[in-house]
Image (cartoon, grey):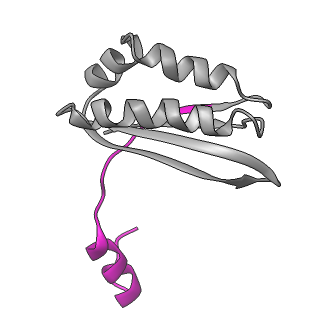
């Protein structure tokens, strides 16, 4: 699984515009069979407003197709509107468990 995390620090005037752009991309992304999830959250980071946009992709090939797509240009435009340097991170992840992992760890039987 591949995870993309983007943090954008919008001006007050641009916050709703950026959210609207990202929301318009969320539906088509999640309709893609290789997109496992897509989320948009708004919060604060060191007292600055921040929009966090995440995408989870099934494979590296799917992530690469996404990054090369025409619609990703709109994500890049949103990134460029950040008032502070944006955070753009990509992770390759291995799923090691779900709730059962928490249960084992809390029961003292977790593996290290």
Nearer to the camera, 106 or 17: 17
Q: Residue at x 30, y 52 (%)?
A: 95
Left or right: residue 101 versus residue 4 is: left
Q: Is residue 108 above or below residue 99?
A: below
Q: Give the image location of residue 31, x and y in percent.
A: 21, 35
Q: Residue at x 56, y 18 (%)?
A: 76
Left or right: residue 82 versus residue 73 is: right
The answer to which image quadrant residue 33 occupies is top left
Nearer to the camera, 76 or 107: 76
Q: Give the image location of residue 32, x and y in percent.
A: 21, 31
Q: Is residue 108 above or below residue 81?
A: below
Q: Is residue 11 above or below residue 78?
A: below
Visible in this render: residue 99? yes
Residue numbers of the magenta segment:
88-112
Q: Give the image location of residue 67, x and y in percent.
A: 41, 17
Q: Residue at x 35, y 20 (%)?
A: 66
Q: Which part of the image, by quadrant, shows the C terminus?
A: bottom left
Q: Which residue in the rendered view is the most extreme toward the left? A: 33
């Amino acid at each position: 699984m591949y995870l993309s995390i983007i943090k954008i620090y919008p001006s007050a005037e641009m916050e709703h515009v950026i959210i609207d752009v990202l929301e318009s991309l969320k539906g088509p992304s999640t309709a893609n069979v290789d997109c496992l999830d897509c989320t948009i959250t708004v919060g604060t980071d060191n007292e600055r407003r921040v929009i966090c946009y995440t995408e989870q992709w099934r494979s590296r090939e799917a992530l690469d197709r996404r990054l090369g797509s025409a619609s990703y240009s709109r994500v890049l435009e949103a990134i460029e509107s950040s008032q502070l340097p944006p955070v753009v991170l990509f992770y390759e992840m291995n799923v090691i468990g779900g709730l059962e992992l928490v249960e084992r760890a809390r029961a003292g039987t977790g593996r290290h």
